[in-house]
Image: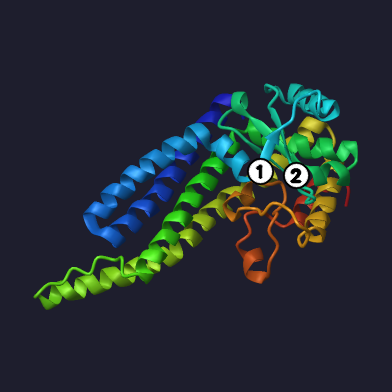
Amino acid sequence: MNSSTIGMESTLKTTLLLGGLSGLLVTIGWLLGGNYGAFFALIFAAFTNLGAWWFSDQIALSMNHARPVDAAQNPTLHQMVETLALRAGIPKPGVYMIDSPMPNAFATGRSPEKGAVAVTTGIMQALEPDELAGVIAHELAHIKHRDTLISSIAATIAGAITMLAQMAQHSLMWGGISSRRSSSDSNGGAEALRAIAAILMVLLAPLAAAIIQMAISRAREFKADAGGAEIMGNPLPLADALMKLERGVSATANQPQPSVNPVSAPLYIVNPLHGGTMQALFSTHPPTAERIRRLKAMAGQA
């Protein structure tokens, strides 16, 4: 697939994503405040969309406490990123570090020219050099495929929906929903139905946003695994890395570290959030075992 086709596909997906998530914002606004609520929610959605488009990379990096690392601070990591970026045929992205014992990494940026790769201090200690290179190659594949824009926008807009839903919950608790009374019983019934719909929307909107993220993220992870293996020229280092990362995330789940915002979890190479069956069901990542199986199949192994 050439870069032009990739760009058109990315633009279409991004447009549909923004439309769907913006629709959730406006619907919440209408249910809570009628036409005025919908108008202000529309303005809020417009500013959020613009902010997500232009600043989604910085928002994602800030949300995850990532700090820039220059070549003097970590020349080995910078050399690895530069070499792999050259193989991928994209500009060298910015390099960031997250002070966390959890071994993980993610990429962001609205285009290859604005790309950034963030790794945790934990992943630097957990992986062998070739395994770390496999992870970096996976993240560069995300940047090359231009799906980092989609992921970053999804995280930003989903965060806005969650924030608005939380504000609405407080409003509901304090009687913030407009309860305009009318002498007409039919109008009163309509208001009651709207209030019930508002409560349901406030409760379900974050879940709907998470499902949209899940649908996008699961497919792109398989694609980035294959792209990373192609950049590396060998799929096995990434397969070995995924196995270690899955175990490492579980092992460090209870250690003190910066909290992971759930809306940014889809950005990471492995899911940084571990929970029960329901969380696994709605995970934005495909099963790690299946990802490893596909990578080994690429190498001709059982």
Q: How many marks?
A: 2
Which quadrant would residue 165 be assigned to in this image? bottom left
Residue 3 image offset from top left, x and y in percent: 59, 25
Q: Residue furthest bottom?
A: 185
Q: Position of residue 80 (x, y in %)?
A: 82, 28
Pointers 2 and 1 in contact (C-beta within 8 Å)? yes
Q: In the rendered image, which quarter is residue 183 located in? A: bottom left
Q: Mark 2 points at which residue?
A: 99
| Secondary structure type for disc 2 | loop
Q: Which residue is drawn at 55% across and 51% down?
A: 213
What x and y, as percent, mark residue 255? 78, 59
- Mark 1: amino acid: His
Within-10-Å neighbours for mark 2: few <14, some 14–19, many 20+: some
**How many angstroms separate mark 2 from mark 1 (CA)?**
8 Å
The coloring applied to the image is rainbow
Q: Residue at x 88, y 52 (%)?
A: 302
Q: Crowding at label 1, few (<14), some or many (≥20) Cα neighbours within 10 Å? A: some
Q: Residue drawn at (57%, 43%), measured in percent from left and top? A: 151
Can you say whether 224 is above or below 84 in the image? below
Q: In this rendering, would 251 be left or right of 282?
A: right
Q: Check the image and name the residue furthest to the left.
A: 183
At label 2, the amino acid type is Asp
User: Pointer 1: what residue?
Assistant: 65
Instruction: Name the disc covering residue 25, or none.
Output: none
**Left or right: 91 in relation to 135:** left
Circle 1 sits in a helix, a strand or a loop, which is it? loop
Left or right? Give the position of 32 relative to 8.
left
Mark sitting earlier along the chain (2/1): 1
On the question of residue 12 being in view, the answer is no
